[in-house]
Amino acid sequence: MRDGNSDSGDANAVSDEELSGPVVDRRTTTKLLGAAGLAGLAGCLGSGGDSETTTSDDGSGGDETETQADANQKQGGRLQAAWFTGSIDVLDPPYISVGQYFQVAGNVFNGLVTLKEDLTVRGDLAKDWTVENDGKKFTFQLREGVKFHNGDEFTADDVKYTIDRTISNEAPAAGKLSSLKSVDDGGVNVKGDYEVELNFEEAMAPALIYLTRGPGRAATIVNKNAIEEMSEEQYKVTPVGTGPFEVTEHEVGSGVTLDAFDDYFETDEDGNSLPYLDGIDVKPISEPATLVNALRGGDVDFANLVPLQNIDKVEQAGEVEKLAAPGVNWYGLAMNQDREPFGSKKARKGIAKSIDNEQFIQTAYFGNAIPAKGPINKATEWVWREDKPDDQSYNSEKGSQLIEEAGASGASFSILTTQDSLRAAKAMRQQLNSAGFDVSVEQVTSSTYWERYEKGNYDTTISGSVGDPDPDQSLYNFYRKPSADGVWNWVNYESDEVHELLAEQRQALDREERKQLLQQLEDKLIADVPHAYLIHQDDVAARRSSVKGFTHIPFLRNFHTTWLDE
């Protein structure tokens, strides 16, 4: 962002007044999304679908929808929700590295602000705010009377504790606040029970976007007393938030029980208490056919993800509706560089050029994805380009040559996978075996998978970034040096150039400058092959026709305005 008081005429400049609350309008929010790299969300969050309209302290609200019109007669009931995973392991926001986990946690917690479907930033736990000092100082006026699930009252101290904990514990989400001043040196100032001030080292207009409730956000408010009473480890399983639903039971591997929180602060436009549902029973189902059959048969009401190979069955089913939105993600073949032959860039490039992405998509996903030439996805359209370097483009003859030159011909290794990714792993094994390797598939439970992946106890796996619509969010944690900020750099990739470019692009407030840095960064990643980039896939969920009032926003699954028409 340029200086808010500048007279340069920059159409992308945003003033302190425009950033201040209680509502940041659509035009200004679009600028913020562009500055944050989230411009691709505009099409996803525009009109259409069931609006997510709630009222805030200033009385603002959206257009009346089926949610408000019918909810008075249709409150109650429990939503049976299937989650396409083997287990839901972590629900503590700053420690969540799996998008599906936050899709549950998003119903338990709140942020300071939230991004609504009508593309405005509105208060969440903050009812108003002002921005000063050319975008470096944010002062939030907080809601009074908000309760945590354990009965504690929410105050400004909780904001400071949340941010301090995230940064001090070096949680994965800490990187979102890298430009915040030190918490102990004026970064977070408590001005009273219901007023808190955030001070940044440099102007950061996208700060409001990063303070929303969403995956990987660093200021999703947690409860200090609950953490101290139950321990950090237990809080990851049964956390306490201020959200519309509270965790009343969570058996890792079996499911999560969410019950409506009676003291939740939000109401709909007519003053009805939210949420409408009595609760949500979240059941992990890792077998694609089992999940789809449960949805079609009415055993579950909602599926957070539809296995792409089963989309046609959902489309053909009666009483079931497919919900699709542009996916903001990338997936690739992760190669552990601490194991041979993946320490050789030539070997990794040879492997990448031996993979036919189009064939992989047809075999693994029945055509329901698009090939990835690099990690930056098409939804971030301001930085996307079709013409990317061809270092990883399919060329079996060149791939074989590089593999032979690297001394990797006939190498034996495994692909680590879970049940829900088994088809993709088998499709990848088929291609790599055809390239002369001896590849096996090692299927494990979801919990074991993430434990081994994070500790580097694997050869290869198919993984990537989900729910990070800003290029920074899908690159910074993955490719910074593991010894620095690369908290998800489980391929053990190190590059001084990439490390510095990732820092530079964060400080480039001019969009064109940042675009050039990001494209330079992507070129380097494509050439170095820390991942063999494979696909971008749409975000596809599904609901039975009895499920009303759900708003499908990419990578989020929020149910506070959802109700059942039995």
Image (cartoon, grey):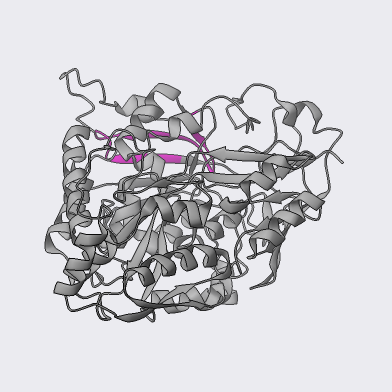
Query: In this orientation, which residue lies closer to the viewer: 79 or 464?
Result: 464
Q: What's the residue at 29%, 46% (across, down)?
A: 199
Residue 373 in the image, given as x and y percentages of width and height? 30, 48
Reply above or below: 297 against 320.
below
* Image-quadrant location for residue 248: bottom right
Q: Quadrant of the C terminus?
A: top right
As for residue 124 lying within the magenta part, the answer is: yes
Reply above or below: 135 against 447.
above
Residue numbers of the magenta segment: 119-140
Relative side of 56 to 358, left or right = right
Q: What's the residue at 51%, 27% (across, down)?
A: 46
As for residue 155 lying within the magenta part, the answer is: no
* Image-quadrant location for residue 519: top left
Q: Quadrant of the N terminus?
A: top left
Q: What's the residue at 62%, 39% (across, down)?
A: 323
Relative side of 429 to 278, left or right = left
Query: In this orientation, which residue lies closer to the viewer: 412 or 221?
Result: 412
Q: Is residue 278 visible?
A: no
Reply above or below: 509 against 89.
above
Residue 560 in the image, given as x and y percentages of width and height? 68, 43
Residue 329 in the image, given as x and y percentages of width and height? 41, 49
* Image-quadrant location for residue 37: top left
Relative side of 396 to 270, left or right = left
Query: In this orientation, which residue lies closer to the viewer: 326 or 426?
Result: 426
The secondary structure that most of the magenta stretch takes on is strand
Residue 541 in the image, given as x and y percentages of width and height? 62, 46
Reply above or below: 371 against 133.
below
